[in-house]
Image: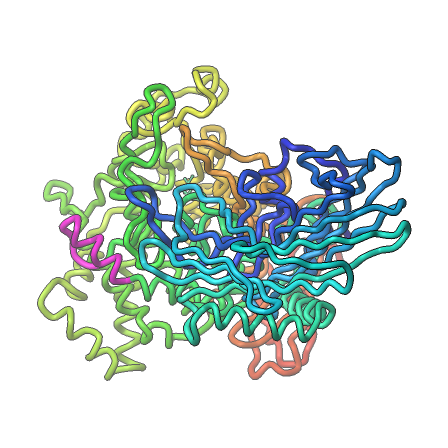
Amino acid sequence: MNWTVREESFDKNQITTNGNKYMTGNGYMGYRGTLEEFGKEQLSAVTLAGLYDRAGEKWREPVNAPNGLFTVISCNGQPLSVLDTEPVSHIQELDFRSAIHRRETVYRTPEGGTVTVTAERFASMDNLHLLLSKLTVSSTIDCRIDIETGIDGEVWDINGPHLFEKKEYAEGDVLISSAVSGELNVPVAVAEIADFGFGEQQIVDGLAIRKLLLDAKAGETYEWHKYVSVYTGLDGGKAPVDNAVEAVQAAAKLGYDELLAAHRKRWEDRWVGSDVIIEGDDEAQMALRYSIYQLLIIAPTESEKVSIPARGLSGQVYKGAVFWDTEMFMLPFFLHSDPSTARNLMMYRIHTLDGARRKAAEYGFLGAFYAWESQDTGDDACTLFNVNDVFTGRPMRTYFRDKQVHISADVVHGIWQYVQFTGDDSLLVDGGAEVIWECARFFYSYAFYNPVKKRYEILDVTGPDEYHERVNNNAFTNALVKESLEISLRTAELLKEKYPAEFEKLTAQFTDGPFLTEIGSMLESFYVPQPDEETLVIEQFDRYHTLEEVTLADLKSRVLNKNEYWGGGNGLATTTKILKQADVVLMMNLFKHSFSKEVKKANWEFYEPRTEHGSSLSPCIYALVAADIGSPDWGYPYFMRTATVDLTGESKQYVGDLYIGGTHPAANGGAWMAAVLGFAGVHFDGDTVHIKPSLPQKWEAVELPVVLRGGTYTLRISRGEVTITAAAGNSSALNFVVDGAEPQLCQPGVQLKLQTAGATV
Ligand code: BGC
């Protein structure tokens, strides 16, 4: 099976796209898929997770570290760079089984020979501070090779500069680049060692660059390694420079092969815990694995202070901010495959609660209003003018920050999913309960009691569909707020029963204001839009049905500038029924047990033709609901579109004049959800695993590992049969229900084969 993506020629126009597609990383840092000789103009970047900086009045964004893998080679004075010399052949490749990037480029020399340069690199999954590479050069003729390598201090920034007091120097054979971030004065250090066993080396004064001269003999291959370590002041322990020097020396001592072996082993383990096998569809298989790879390279396995930004670690786009994408689109993957990372993701929200409290207070509300774009402190990085109008060049007022209140409900949903799924209710005591209650209090203060209709409503919001801002009673938002209120009461019951002392302590802070009693009574008359009796369609928000009916094609024909924003004050879509992304249908996916198949089908059929899928968060939801209503083949194209988004590079690159390219972790998580929760039909309700296969025609079976309540299971789901294999080491049994049949208990070490309803006997 194919575990690689590959380019077999060099195309300048693909530099940016390939920078995303060939990404490597390890959750601590992301390394863009650029070539060794590239610099900031080609968007080379080592993006650090969780370190943010604001330069002047510009947008705050993550810090990129100096690039320690930078290398330029020349032969007889001719630079061997794809940017200067057209290569005879060029291969760029990503082995996503082991997260290794490779390139091989052959150049012709004026003397008639050819020189081949190869490079292999990885961001170690075994030691998250290390970047390692192995390079070779060989020539068919005798020639003079110059190698310039070290740490490139010219860093690519969108809203920089972020690094000050830069020092570039050498200590013995170690090159060092150190700096401090401008806003918070956090030190950043990169150290490098290169282990040439040939040539003459010289370190360039005042730069962290070494030059090497080599009289290369025809037919000989010269190989060397680069060891690079990256530390910041957020890592704790010693000063970052000392940490970096120590780490790089230790790495060089261990040697490349050993480091590679440890890295590979980690990746092997990661795949054992997360690989999803699709039988019968190689294309889907490759795309899904690649999507999982993208999630694995950005997962914060070792830190609960960071979460996953909307563009992963592929650069500074979207300010490196964390959106609802994490809870709603990525969390399910981690819950099923790596609960400890799922916990880290939720702890991040707990650590940023104070920022959410500040935001609520800023707007005059109680409790916690989470940041639409969250960084290290939880204060909102989202501006009031997030898009520029392409026609006037003027900033456009957008209501993402102040009106997308569903974010607080999404956070509650995520925490509750975690607790229900894993059974680990210690998260509630560790701050989760406080988050839940503060969000409920926020909604209590945000809601409007309609005295005529005698119900609580949620007015003036922006739902998931960002093209319709400031609407009333967005069905999705109301449904999620209702869920938050319910969760806050259930949390109170759970804590009272299991952790009474903590309950008393935690609730002491809420004695003065509205709390559980008020939330309870709000819930009794809380309004959530319901399906129309005749059409079964749920109106996306009050008066949506009065908007202009226009086809997507007609709306597109009105576009004057390909980058114009369809939402905002004058946006083309705002006066029409065209929506940006799944909204009502997303609600049907989240609460799938609350809606009949007929209602889901009616809403899918109504909203899909009106959905632009202008966000990569959209198609996977239509795939999920299509699978749920038993029409997987409707869903299949949406799944493929989601799973290939970072392979094809076919996604929106600009909104207004704002560059929004990069990788798409929400879509990566969405692809996983569509395959596993949708087509394979897996649903764990915290007690029983329900499996209702709904496989696309091409798929024969889906096989995957899952961690449920601390036990490990392998599920193989085909049209006719579900095989459940429980690991022998599991400490308890779990009930499985296939297609609504009687529950079957699966004991540790046992394999169950259960027939599906569609099985041909
Ligand atoms: C979508 C949001 C999403 C954000 C980041 C926007 O285009 O409309 O729902 O959270 O991108 O991915």
Q: In which of the image's four quarters is ligand 1 placed?
A: top left
**Magenta stretch?**
353-367
Q: Position of residue 184 (x, y in %)?
A: 32, 58
Colouring chosen for the image of the structure: rainbow
The relative height of residue 161 versus residue 332 in the rendered view (above or below) is above
The chief SS type of the magenta part is helix
Magenta highlight on residue 396: no
The relative height of residue 600 versus residue 605 in the rendered view (above or below) is below
The relative height of residue 70 versus residue 690 in the rendered view (above or below) is above
Which is nearer the eye, 686 or 562? 562
Magenta highlight on residue 362: yes
Which is nearer the eye, 563 or 71? 71
Determine whether, in the image, residue 748 is placed left or right of residue 595. Answer: right
The structure residue drawn at horizontal position 30% and vertical position 71%, both measured from the top left corner, is 431
The structure residue drawn at horizontal position 65% and vertical position 48%, both measured from the top left corner, is 36
Determine whether, in the image, residue 519 is placed left or right of residue 678. Answer: left
